[in-house]
Image (cartoon, rainbow, N blue to C red):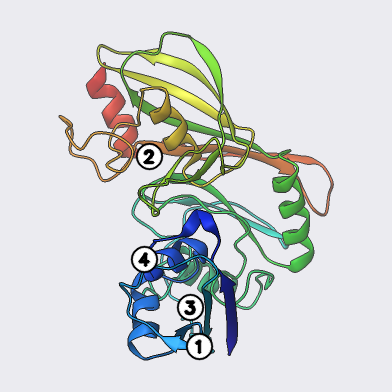
Amino acid sequence: MEQFSYRVGVEDEDERIDKWISNTLSSLSRSYIQKLIKDNQLFVNDKPQKASYRIKVDDEIRFQVPDVAAPVIPAEDIPLNVLYEDSDLLIVDKPKGMVVHPAPGHYSGTLVNAVMFHCKNNLSGINGVMRPGIVHRIDRDTTGALIVCKNDAAHQQIASQLKSHSITRKYRAIVHGRLPLEEGSIDAPIGRDVKERKKMAVNLQNGKHAVTHYKTLKTYKEYTYIECQLETGRTHQIRVHMASIGHPLLGDEIYGSRKTNFRLNGQTLHAMTIGFIHPSTQKYLEIEAPLPEYFQHLLSVLE
């Protein structure tokens, strides 16, 4: 049982309590907070309150979250496109539409289910039962190269390289419009969107340092084919950064336009190249994931 206690500051006065807690504690959804309130598990100044209660300065908010039994994640015989494999690492070409790891209510059909079957018990356990072997991730509708670690030592070394921004990560994307510069860099912090908490945005006050380098590969009438290289790795970084300069990714319904002349399932974004120092050999290893068929077809149509 995990217990939480907060005291309301001046800057948060008059906020709905359910909204304030879900914004303060992002690991709990607003609907879950509302259930705790409905079950009289949340107290304000030692008294239960409704979800619509508007907090006041110096209110003491207290609640506890029951322990949840760890879910059983099944190994599933899902085909994998393996780009590289040895005793330390597995690098796969993740397909469009596949979620990287399980989440509450979605415990099957993910990349983790597939690699659990492929690797048997040989996966790092640093990120727990929900994310065995997973050291980084890409969005559901983003395709391309992803590293899976087979042991904790490899996981720690790859994680260290990710933290120091020394891993090479190059993406291919198609964006709306024609870029005014052949290449450039976007240096803008990324954090939660202040209005829509499930989205990310350029957030100058509370965002984390984020840098994306881009260059034009081909210009079309209404679109530009680009390569992006990540210096940092924030959630939705390329999608947010390109949208912030007025060139959202084609097919991106969250940060771009829903209107398009093409039938697409999400953003046109592909993690093409990943390079790093191998945890055992200590030599630089670079792996490339070929463009998926839908992406190649789209480029041929644009031609």
- Image check: 174 left or right of 83? left
Q: Amino acid at mark 2?
A: Pro
Please tell me which residue is depicted at 38% across the width and 39% down the height of the picture. Answer: 292
Mark nearer the viewer, 4 or 1 = 1
Mark nearer the viewer, 1 or 3 = 1
Q: Earlier in the sequence, mark 3 or mark 4?
A: 4
Residue beneath label 2, please? 292
Q: Amino acid at mark 4?
A: Arg
Mark nearer the viewer, 4 or 2 = 4
Considering depth in this image, is 252 or 51 the residue closer to the camera? 51
Q: Earlier in the sequence, mark 4 or mark 2?
A: 4
Please tell me which residue is depicted at 59% across the width and 62% down the height of the picture. Answer: 134
Give the distance between the C-alpha atoms of the residues marked 3 and 2, in whole angstroms. 26 Å
Q: Secondary structure at mark 4?
A: loop
Mark nearer the viewer, 1 or 2 = 1
Which quarter of the image is occupied by the N terminus? bottom right
Give the distance between the C-alpha atoms of the residues marked 4 and 2, in whole angstroms. 46 Å
Considering depth in this image, is 195 or 292 the residue closer to the camera? 195
Residue beneath label 3, please? 75
Q: Earlier in the sequence, mark 3 or mark 2?
A: 3
Give the distance between the C-alpha atoms of the residues marked 1 and 3, in whole angstroms. 45 Å
Q: Picture coordinates of residue 291 (x, y %)? A: 42, 35
